Amino acid sequence: MVDMPAPQPPADEKTCPRRLRSDAERNRDLIVRAARQVFAGEGLGASMAAVARRAGVGIATLFRRFPTRAHLVDAAFAESMEACAGAMEAALADPDPWHGFTSFIGHVCEMQAADRGFADLLTMAFPAAEALEAKRAEAYRGFAELIARAQAAGRLRTDFSPDDLVVLLMANAGVLAATHDAAPDAWRRLVAYMLQAFAVRDGEPLPPAPSPGTLHQAMVRLSSENPDTPTP
Amino acid sequence: MVDMPAPQPPADEKTCPRRLRSDAERNRDLIVRAARQVFAGEGLGASMAAVARRAGVGIATLFRRFPTRAHLVDAAFAESMEACAGAMEAALADPDPWHGFTSFIGHVCEMQAADRGFADLLTMAFPAAEALEAKRAEAYRGFAELIARAQAAGRLRTDFSPDDLVVLLMANAGVLAATHDAAPDAWRRLVAYMLQAFAVRDGEPLPPAPSPGTLHQAMVRLSSENPDTPTP
């Protein structure tokens, strides 16, 4: 019997794992970039098939990388959530608490106007998008601090509820959906009125804020109208 | 030749035209009532087939009576538009111009919250629904008078634009769409803030109102997303 050398993988198979990794990374980047563009134009209800088409990958590849819509949303909006966190940091560092409070809200509403996907994101909860929901929880904590500072400075009305920001974002979404092409600055009017209404003054008392948790339920319901794994 | 009497239609044929008329009237009422219910629940985008099903008539019968969606909308909301006109009349007769102004807005927003079809109607223009658009034009004239009176009384800010009511209705539609089942009173918060913001005070100047006509364009676009004669 001839002593056969142990079989060696051919040269191109040896480099294969690395190539697979880099192909996978490339596909992932293509998909995330495509998702950002498609979500920005069509909102989070856009079809996964449209994202795959835009990315130039098959739908099976997309679902292999991102088994649910929540996974894709998580990846697509990581940068926007970072930008949001940056705006929060700047607002908390603002020596004028009222200016910090109003400029944070203005910043978020501006992001909402610029990106329909981000707009959906702001008013939809995605319990399965863990990174995103962790950042959202962090933003809520930061916002509570912005509120406390602006109230302590005597500038923000004491009956302001954190949920009023959610109400404003939902309201802004309504204006944006109706006007984005014909009157793209109409939303600024809403936000300016609301910020002025949030300021301390001798106004009528407000109706009670929504019961705790109910707005979150509404946000979950909104997102469940965009099922996680729709038929593409 | 026997002198034959001129042939007489049988008794049931004689009554036929009247029966046809009353059948047609009955069908019309059934369809209008069904349209009100379906639009109230699903908005003006509801399918004509759903209206026909609810009315218990064939789709052909529906289209014979109401050749386009605009015709049906016109008929279904005649009463609501009357109620709106009544609220306007009461507001104009209010000895307190500010109370008249705010109560009219509150009334319209309440109707918007109660009926999703009416909510759509408020932010969509239906150029083909003539009776409805005539009433809308009348309401705009009345609203201009409410504004003038409240401003003359020194209560409404002078930079308030009639379009701000449209912006508020679009905003309210956004809140209602997001919260109607989970937090059905959240919209009251928005409206209360906005009414307080409309009052005269030493506030920051507002960003400019949308250019004339642009909001109307937005309303027309919204309604054109519900084509007149969709495949049922």
Image (cartoon, coloured by chain):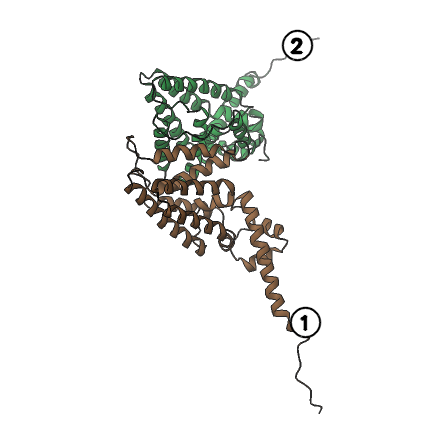
Chain colours: A brown, B green
At 71% from the left and 90% from the top, the residue drawn is A2
* Marks 2 and 1 in Cβ contact (< 8 Å): no
Q: In this figure, which residue is indicated by the disc labeled 1?
A: A12
Q: Residue furthest bottom?
A: A1
Q: In this view of the protein, which residue sits in the foreground, B13 or B194?
A: B194
Q: Categorize mark 1 by other alpha carbons within 10 Å: few (<14), some (14-19), many (20+).
A: few
Tags 2 and 1 on a common chain: no
| In this view, A232 is above or below B152 | below
Type of the residue with mark 2 = Met
Measured from the top left, where is residue A61 in percent x and y? 59, 58
At 49% from the left and 36% from the top, the residue drawn is A176
Measured from the top left, where is residue A83 in percent x and y? 46, 49
Q: In this view of the protein, which residue sits in the foreground, A92 or A185?
A: A92
Q: Nearer the viewer, mark 2 or mark 1?
A: 1
Instruction: Say whether residue A46 is visible.
Output: no
| In this view, A40 is above or below B193 | below
- Left or right relative to B143: residue A10: right
Type of the residue with mark 1 = Asp
Pointer 1 chain:
A
Q: In this figure, which residue is indicated by the disc labeled 2?
A: B4
Q: Categorize mark 2 by other alpha carbons within 10 Å: few (<14), some (14-19), many (20+).
A: few
Pointer 2 chain:
B
Query: Which part of the image, by quadrant, shows the C terminus of chain B?
Result: top right
